[in-house]
Image (tube, coloured by chain):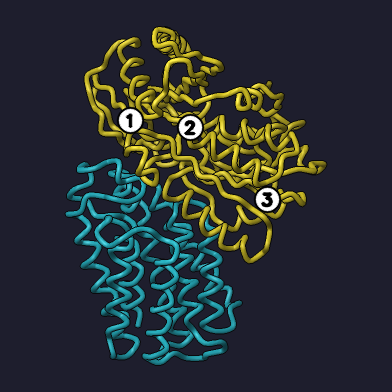
Chain colours: A cyan, B yellow
Amino acid sequence: MLTLELLQKMLLTAAVALKENVIPLCELDSVAGDGDHGLTIGRMADAIKQRVESGASADIKELLDDLSMDFMGVNGGSAGPLWGTVFGGFAEGVDEGAAELDTAAVHKMLEQAKEDFMDISKAKPGDKTMVDALYPALDAGIACSGDTKAIFTAMAAAANKGAEATANMVARFGRAKNVGERSLGYKDPGAVSMALLLTKMAEAI
Amino acid sequence: MQKFINKPEDLTSELLEGLALSNPEIISLEQGNLVVNKKLAEADRVTIVTLGGTGHEPAISGFVGEGMVDISVAGNIFAAPGPQACVEAIKMADKGHGVLFVVLNHAGDMLTGNLTMKQIKKLGIPVIKVVTQEDIANAPRENADDRRGLVGCVPLYKIAGAAAAQGKSLEEVAAIAQKFADNMATIAVATKGATHPATGMEIAHIEDGIMEVGMGQHGEGGGGSQPMKSADETAAIMMNALLKDLDVQAGEKLLVIINGSGATTLMEQLIVFRACHKLLADKGIEVAASAVGEILTVQETAGFQMFIARMDEEMLGYWNAPCRTPYYKN
């Protein structure tokens, strides 16, 4: 069962790891981007820490929604609005007042996130973006009929596989697409940070 | 590259404060990153809101003021701001006649623009979004979605601002802005990349002796690497490409802008403009209006953007209308 307490632990664990990876993510982003992805992710990590430690969110739905708003407001690249959309989708997929989520409820959360994300993003699998980690992860989570740990572990595995695969892709979306072949051999930072988030969340369970 | 900055995390807030403090009669800085036309409070017309990353000074916040932009929502260096700030800006800007929301076609700006429009719909404020996507380098005219928005947004602000100042309706202002947007074209060239002020990392790398035609304005390449040429030769390559893209005919009038990217001297920009003027004269095309200088820069990038827009009497009227912003006054 996914409880508020467990979710808080998962998020805080992820926040620490994200913060530790600010510089590597910047370096990765300077290949095909302007090198600031790590900075944005660092701010997202700070937002997570602040929100969770404040304890102000009453339940799972509220925490996810509050984080969504926090992410939307983070100054930096598109990661803010994009993660905001994912978490906003998670929040929308959770029933009002739910104190703990079973497998079916977690699936509903993941499905809503995918729907909301597809609604605002034109990026497709293979474009070399965070979508290459996110969509496989959400699909794997939805397909997994185990408990919370199994679901998040499946998500993390799929996200990592997706992020690895981006190294062989030529960017077809966003600023990076103008760099063409120069980005071959390097993973997409958006996919890497998404995979890191999910990996650490899974590890904390 | 050593820059006169303080802490990297304070870059955007400090530059915006500096802009507001040096132009106190024209603009004010609100909610941290909204650059607001001081005359907005008394406005009784369609208003103009736009968004964009900082790091391109004077663009875009340097063009807030009477006759151009009413509120510019400023993001971090080269990064689009989030949708919440844009929603706040639109709420603040609406004076009962609706808002023209100008968005440049870059993935981040468009994401924020779309998220903003979703929320605005729920609030019921009349807003029409116009997207600028005039860079001819990436894709043909038919694939507008792949074309980046470069310096063209700035003359568009002027055109739209003038139409709004005349008291035109939101639909009319949007139609005029869209017509201008559909009849403009830009192409950039760069010979030296710049460094991101916050990270210090190179945002583009160009070999010595090479110029990259079709360069983006955050260091994205354009694919047109070739040995460096003279001003006249380069101008010809770029202007001919622009004329072809817009299908400009003899007898037509153009607005021509040479926009320095940051490290190319005004001297060079003027020499390039001269070449453009002669080339156009030879083709029977009139330069009815022009601007040369740094309008939308990319830090210390060496290079420039060449811009043309098809002009008629109406558009020239908007271009020549008075305006008062920190970096453009008429």
Quarter of the image that includes the C terminus of chain A: bottom left
Q: Residue at x 82, y 41 (%)?
A: B42
Please say if the residues under marks 1 and 2 sit with CB atoms less than 8 Å apart.
Answer: no
Choose the circle earlier in sequence order: 1 or 2: 2
The residue that mark 3 highlights is B31
Residues B210 and A157: in front is B210
- Kind of residue at badge 3: Gln
Where does the image place residue B211, in percent across and percent down from the top left? 28, 22
Does residue B74 appear anywhere in the picture?
no
Quadrant of the image occupied by residue B276:
top left
Q: Nearer the viewer, residue B229 or B302?
A: B229
- Mark 1 falls within which chain? B
Task: Look at 36% across and 65% down and name the residue there.
Answer: A17
In this figure, which residue is indicated by the disc labeled 1?
B214
Side of B255 where A184 appears, left or right: left
Report x, y in % for residue A74: 52, 57
Q: CA distance from mark 1 to mark 2?
A: 19 Å
Are discs 3 and 1 less than 8 Å apart at CB? no
Foreground tag (3 vs 1): 1
Label at residue B48? none
Amino acid type, residue under disc 1 in the picture: Gly
Between label 1 and label 2, give the one nearer the viewer: 2
SS for dot 3? loop
How many angstroms separate mark 2 from mark 3 (CA)? Answer: 35 Å
Residue at label 2? Answer: B183
Percent of width and height locating residue B182 = 48, 36
Residue at x 76% of width, y 41% of height: B40
Pointer 2: residues within 10 angstroms few (<14), some, or many (20+)?
Answer: some
Q: Amino acid at mark 2?
A: Asn
